[in-house]
Amino acid sequence: WPGTSLPALLFVVFQMTFAIIASAIISGSVAERMKFSAYVCFICLWSVLVYAPVCHWVWGPDGWMEEIGVKDFAGGNVVHETTAVSALVLAILLGPRLGHGESEKPAPHNVPFAILGAALLWFGWSGFNGGSALAADETAVLALVNTYTTASASLVAWALLERLQHKRSSATGTVTGAVVGLVIITPAAGYVSPFGALVMGFVGCAFVYPSFQLSHRRVDDNLDAFPCHGVASFVGACLTGVFAKDGGLLYGGGLRLLGVEVLAAAATAVYATFVTATIFFVLSRFMRMRVHEHDESVGLDNACHGEMAYGMNGATPISPFEH
């Protein structure tokens, strides 16, 4: 690939991993109510019409964000801002799950699996952030150290904040804090010092934590995709403008970098909102976007795919439907 020692196909595969994780983030806000066929069609169009253009703006040759000096080392804007905003738009347009807002938020389904999933994310992030140096060099090592440092600091900050609010710290809460930290450091991983990464973890988590407390009956973001990825990526972009060693506010760069980071995040949010809504409304003219109430009440594993995650005595998959 031009400018690197990487074979072109290796670079292509690496970029594909960023694109595919984006679709997984979006799925978290529409789970349990969006038709599988509609989701597949949406992701195909979204990847081309939302993800690819923003990716080019930030990383591609002659991308306007790259030309004005936006720093996004591993996809804070490209991956997390686009997906979080699109996930929020989809959650609003689809409407909430049956019974949402009528009772307390359901407890985590499987805490050990949540911890395992967070651990796998953390491990994978080593590749995303470290690999974004596109070489096995000092920048890659810096990105890796900063990734672990910010995630750890954010985990500790979340545990402390949760203890202040609820008088206890939870396992699911602390791993959420770690993921928030991973998102925060993503745009800055190769641009800040380890000490800056440490501060970003603590300060960033303090800004993101309150957004998880917000709720609305009409907005059912199942897995908190917007606060975890949208708010955290915006905070990370702003802190990049503060702590970046080249052009950051604390390093004598003034407000310019901070300004372009905010501009890029805002432009991405507006673009993702408009195109996501357009894709949704166009698809809705040709296909049903949401499952029937009966299917939703039964559960989509059963109703849509004819299988169940956990075999229960006397329970059998219902007849297949067109999904």
Image (cartoon, rainbow, N blue to C red):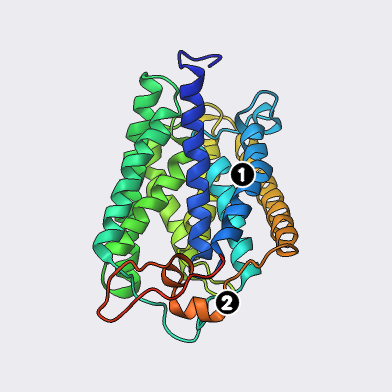
Q: Secondary structure at mark 2?
A: loop
Residue furthest front in the image? 319
Q: Which mark is residue 292?
A: 2
Label 1, residues with CA under 10 Å away: few <14, some 14-19, many ≥20: some
State the residue at coordinates (67%, 48%): 266
The residue carrying mark 1 is: 47
Image coordinates of residue 117 in percent, x first then y, are: 32, 53
Q: Which amino acid type is shown beneath numbered disc 1?
A: Ser
Image coordinates of residue 261 in percent, x first then y, are: 61, 40
State the residue at coordinates (66%, 48%): 45
Distance between the Cα atoms at labels 2 and 1?
A: 26 Å
State the residue at coordinates (32%, 33%): 145
> Image quadrant of residue 134?
top left
The quarter of the picture where the C terminus appears is: bottom right
Image coordinates of residue 270 in percent, x first then y, are: 71, 52
State the residue at coordinates (49%, 15%): 4
